[in-house]
Image (cartoon, grey):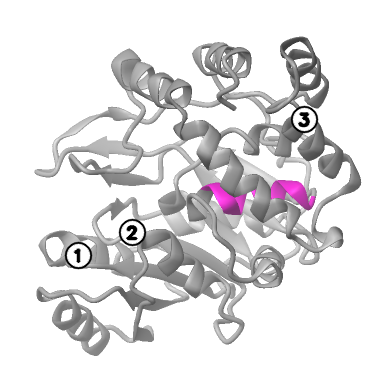
Amino acid sequence: MADKNEVATIVPHGNIDAAQIAILMCTKDGAAFLGQQLKSIADQTHTNWVLLVSDDGSHDETREILRHFAETHHQTTTIRNGPGKGACVNFLSLAIDPTIDADYFAFSDQDDIWHQDKLRRALTWLVTVPSDVPGLYCGRTELMSIDERSYGFSPLFTRPPTFRNALVQTLGGGNTMVFNRAAKKILEAAATVEVVLHDWWMYQLVSAADGMVHYDPQPGLKYRQHPDNLFGSNLGWRARLIRLRMMLSGHFHDWNDTNIAALRRLPAYLIAPRNREVLELFAKARSASLLKRLHYLRQSGIYRQTLLGNLGLLAAAILKRI
């Protein structure tokens, strides 16, 4: 995969203003903060969007808020019932639906606040990607508490976005992701599979197919932190040590079981041969004897984005926790 940060030399082949974005939002009892998120969508400098919402059985005023938004904005808003199996399945139910079509697609949580130029910044890069090449934009977030107090940013990642990284780490949150039609076609071809997180799966799929992935170091939204966030901000050493402990406790091993099984079920054409080789080397590094585990790990070239993350990866390999 080429260096995706070197986009200045690429001549855009699309018109940004003419590009339609389908915003894929999932909701579940989100009335407390949904209005702010919807307002931030309505305030986008890029106005050519439609909103598709999959509600996973809300019992509060979520649907009423969505209906009012649909009635008061000229852009189309569609609300449907979700599968009721959690956020990951709900997001993928939208992303793999072949009847949902647009030029580009953006995942949206129900409780963030988007910066006004979020969509336009994503499009500025995405229109440089050839239409037949899967393209995925993601990036950093500005962190805020439940009561909207800002307290920093998610970690700044600097290593290249590749399949060797995607196997062991998700790069950007789903709430930052915008992708093109070619990337959506890959999701549709992968169909319904059991995976850990929709954003991690998105990163794995696009990079596995040798698509183009761009990580934006400039935050495009305020990410609301709740006590029950699945992964949270990863901000500071305490949060990173918690993640390291999760990795060594066996959670990481179980997640990899799930993701490897999903990747192996993909049609052969969805994974570039060199990435298929990396996948199998990684699989061998999880079950061989200690010296062979370390050999396969090194041969696969997999890596995480930070020094602590890579030390944790090595420790997990030694302890047979990958």
Between 5 and 184, the residue placed more toward the observer is 184
Residue 46 visible in the current orientation: no
Q: Which residue is mark 3?
A: 284
Q: Which residue is mark 1?
A: 34
Q: Which stretch did the figure color magenta?
A: 200-209
For the C terminus, give its image quadrant: top right
- Circles 3 and 2: CB atoms closer than 8 Å: no
What amino acid is at disc 3?
Answer: Lys
Between discs 2 and 1, the one toward the N terminus: 1
109 sits left or right of 135 in the view: left
Residue 202: within the magenta?
yes
What amino acid is at disc 2?
Answer: Asp
For the N terminus, give its image quadrant: top right
Mark 3: few/some/many CA within 10 Å (<14, 14-19, 20+) = some
- Circles 2 and 1: CB atoms closer than 8 Å: no
Callout in the foreground (1, 3): 3
Callout in the foreground (3, 2): 3
Secondary structure of the residue carrying numbered label 2: loop
Residue 264: within the magenta?
no
Mark 1: few/some/many CA within 10 Å (<14, 14-19, 20+) = many
284 sits left or right of 138 in the view: right
Residue 109 is marked as 2
Residue found at the far right of this picture: 273
Task: State the CA–CA distance, disc 1 to disc 3.
Answer: 45 Å
5 sits left or right of 61 in the view: right
What amino acid is at disc 1?
Answer: Leu
Indicate the quadrant where residue 278 lies.
top right
- Circles 1 and 3: CB atoms closer than 8 Å: no
